[in-house]
Image (spheres, grey):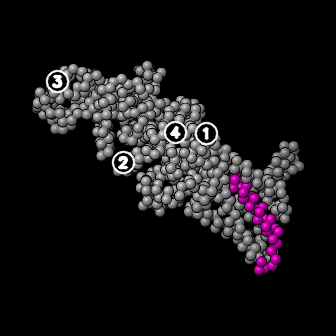
């Protein structure tokens, strides 16, 4: 449906997008992920023909966007970062204008009504766009993209400015749309991408850093295995920390254990890292059983998209002096994974993340940030990678 | 093109620009009508049309200032440029919307003619001739204004630059009027300016000369500047 070949965009000397190639099949939901200024929006603008590429090709349903723009653009519904709304028009008038602009042949009233229903903007149809809140404007923007039922939908950060309920609604909507349309979605909200997309492309510094499903990318990025445990010790004092950390450290396959903050009164969290080959969860359970400790929480934290994202975007940064092997080969092939176990565990992990972000995403993100900070704060582990991770986190938060 | 035309017409009236434009146009042209025709006790409308060059010059920038500059500022151009239409559709849609409003405004002269009808015989040939002359003049100036609007994101800048450009066009002939018998460089400048003269071409009509070359001149100016506008939009995409 969409084919991108060696797409490059240069602004003067600055390379915004460098040699990107990918394909999106019909009915696929593709997530575009990348830090600020990575080239997401530039790529999307090139896909939709808003700006031209310096080199390379974009084929929409086999039609080159620069050679036959009218035909190619007729297949695209585009929601840019800032929805292109005329604020002095009513929603109805605006959608009607877009209907004309896109030379839509579907029955006008029924089609606009359908689109409004889909985006839940029926009740504001008569209002001026300038009087609408950001969330409603975003939805009108989405409605505009849906007019004429384009087979390809390109959405640049569609959930920005929406409240958590609306975010869930829009995500569900996008998922629904993904059944009939090919969707490309950009976001820097990781759980969102994870919840909605079939496939993820991570863009960093204008290049494709990873391409595949979350699991596939995860498998290729890290073979380490991390988890967070919350164990109730016998004494409910700081002495537990040493005792429990020491006991876990002695298990086979555990590479590294660190006692974390006191999360509940007298109960501590432990970050455990394994060699990635051994599944130590059962062993830990057994250990706690024997000692009479209680496991209150066990969370596999190795394969969250956050980690992958940070890892990839950071590694690119560290590339130049640290990991020279990857520099020559920034693209990670999808099928290269070999560790079957890792994958199975990730699948078990996924619904949990899903549920978490559905209910209270902001809090989850905050917690993440906090724990990240603490990690960096502890002298034990605060190497360059961690603090860079923290920076990434706070950058993301600011935006 | 039609969609953009319709939206632009609607925007003229919802934003109030149309009301300002029409009010000022009709008010000032009414003054010219009274002074030049009624008070002078004539039914020849040429004097009025001659003065109306000033209104056209001052009001066209108001009409064109936001046509493209605001699209760029509000990023609504993203919607237009990613829609399955050509750049010509966008430019011409906006151009004809502005032109339509201009035609509505200048058609007030027919009401004046109606009033004159009670005082004596209206000289229809000059009236119609002048009406079209003004239409072509407006067509050329709107294209210039639209082009200037495409160059900036700022409405005010667009309006001011447009006004200055039209003013220079107006004044240029008077500035070089002594150059006709000067040295070679002066004569060349004189020749160029008088060939490109908007004002004297327009006033020729008010003297009753309906010259085809002038019509062609105005129309080609309109085409040329619309073409430039399209190129500006295209260039923005490629840079």
Residue B161 visible to an observer of this rendering: no
Residue A1, how many percent across, how many down? 52, 39
The residue drawn where x is 66% and y is 55% is B95
Chain letter for the residue marked with disc 2 in the picture: A
Location of mark 1 (residue): A66
- Of residues A42 and B183, the one nearer the viewer is A42
Mark 3 / mark 2, whichever is N-terminal: 2
Give the Cα separation between the discs numbered 1 and 4.
16 Å
- Mark 2 secondary-structure assignment: helix
Mark 2 / mark 4, whichever is N-terminal: 4
Give the Cα separation between the discs numbered 1 and 2.
36 Å
| Marks 1, 2 in one chain | yes
Location of mark 3 (residue): A247
Mark 1 / mark 2, whichever is N-terminal: 1
Q: Where is residue A342, by image quadrant?
A: top left
| Marks 3, 2 in one chain | yes
Q: Is residue B136 magenta?
A: yes
Location of mark 2 (residue): A168
Chain letter for the residue marked with disc 4 in the picture: A
Q: Is residue B134 magenta?
A: yes
Residues shaded magenta: B117-144
Tell me if mark 4 has few (under 14), some (14-19) or many (20+) residues whose alpha carbon lies within 10 angstroms of its own.
Answer: some
Chain letter for the residue marked with disc 1 in the picture: A
The residue drawn where x is 22% and y is 32% is A229
Chain letter for the residue marked with disc 3 in the picture: A
| Marks 3, 4 in one chain | yes
């Amino acid at each position: 449906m969409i084919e991108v070949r060696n797409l490059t965009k240069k602004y003067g000397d600055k390379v915004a997008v460098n040699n990107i190639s990918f394909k999106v099949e019909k009915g696929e939901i593709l997530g575009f992920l990348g830090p600020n200024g990575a080239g997401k929006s530039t790529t999307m603008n090139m896909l939709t023909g808003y700006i031209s590429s310096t080199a390379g090709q974009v084929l929409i349903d086999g039609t080159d966007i620069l050679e036959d723009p009218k035909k190619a653009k007729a297949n695209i519904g585009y929601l840019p970062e800032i929805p292109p709304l005329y604020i002095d028009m009513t929603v109805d008038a605006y959608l009607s204008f877009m209907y004309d602009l896109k030379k839509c042949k579907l029955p006008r009233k029924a089609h606009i009504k359908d689109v409004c229903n889909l985006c839940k903007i029926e009740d504001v149809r008569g209002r001026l766009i300038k009087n609408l809140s950001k969330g409603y404007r975003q939805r009108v923007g989405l409605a505009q993209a849906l007019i004429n039922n384009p087979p390809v939908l390109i959405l640049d950060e569609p959930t920005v400015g929406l409240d958590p309920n609306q975010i869930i609604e829009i995500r569900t909507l996008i998922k629904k749309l993904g059944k009939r349309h090919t969707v490309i979605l950009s976001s820097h909200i990781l759980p969102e991408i994870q919840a909605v997309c079939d496939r993820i492309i991570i863009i960093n510094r204008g290049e494709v850093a990873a391409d595949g499903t979350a699991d596939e990318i995860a498998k290729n990025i890290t073979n380490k295995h991390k988890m967070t445990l919350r164990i109730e010790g016998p004494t409910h004092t700081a002495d537990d920390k040493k005792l429990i950390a020491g006991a876990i450290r002695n298990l086979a396959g555990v590479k590294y254990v660190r006692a974390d903050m006191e999360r509940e009164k007298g109960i501590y969290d432990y970050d455990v890292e394994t060699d990635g080959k051994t599944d130590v969860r059962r062993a830990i359970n057994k250990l706690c059983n024997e000692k009479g400790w209680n496991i209150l929480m066990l969370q596999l934290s190795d394969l969250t998209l956050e980690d992958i994202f940070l890892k990839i975007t950071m590694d690119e940064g560290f590339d130049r002096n640290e990991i020279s092997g990857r520099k020559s080969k920034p693209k990670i092939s999808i099928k290269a994974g070999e560790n079957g176990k890792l994958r199975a565990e990730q699948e078990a992990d996924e619904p949990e993340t899903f549920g978490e972000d559905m209910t209270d995403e902001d809090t989850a993100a905050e917690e993440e940030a906090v724990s990240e900070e603490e990690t960096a704060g502890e002298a034990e582990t605060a190497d360059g990678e961690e603090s860079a991770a923290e920076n990434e986190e706070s950058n993301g938060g600011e935006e | 093109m039609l969609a953009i035309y319709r939206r632009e017409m609607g925007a003229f009236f919802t934003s109030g620009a149309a009301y300002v434009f029409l009010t000022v146009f009709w008010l000032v042209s009414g003054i010219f009508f009274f002074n030049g025709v009624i008070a002078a006790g004539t039914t020849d409308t040429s004097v009025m049309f001659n003065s109306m060059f000033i209104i056209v010059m001052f009001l066209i920038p108001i009409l064109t200032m936001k046509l493209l500059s605001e699209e760029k500022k509000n990023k609504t151009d993203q919607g237009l440029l990613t829609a399955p239409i050509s750049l010509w559709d966008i430019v011409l849609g906006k151009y004809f919307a502005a032109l339509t409003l201009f035609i509505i405004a200048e058609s007030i002269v027919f009401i004046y003619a109606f009033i004159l009808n009670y005082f004596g015989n209206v000289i229809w040939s000059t009236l119609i001739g002048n009406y079209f002359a003004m239409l072509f003049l407006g067509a050329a100036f709107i294209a210039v204004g639209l082009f200037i609007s495409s160059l900036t994101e700022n409405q005010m800048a667009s309006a001011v630059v447009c006004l200055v450009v039209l003013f220079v066009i107006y004044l240029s002939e008077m500035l070089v009027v002594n150059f006709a018998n000067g040295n070679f460089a002066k004569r060349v400048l004189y020749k160029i300016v008088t060939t490109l003269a908007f004002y004297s071409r327009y006033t020729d009509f008010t003297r009753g000369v309906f010259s085809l070359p002038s019509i062609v001149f105005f129309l080609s100016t309109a085409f040329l500047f619309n073409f430039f506008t399209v190129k500006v939009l295209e260039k923005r995409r490629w840079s």
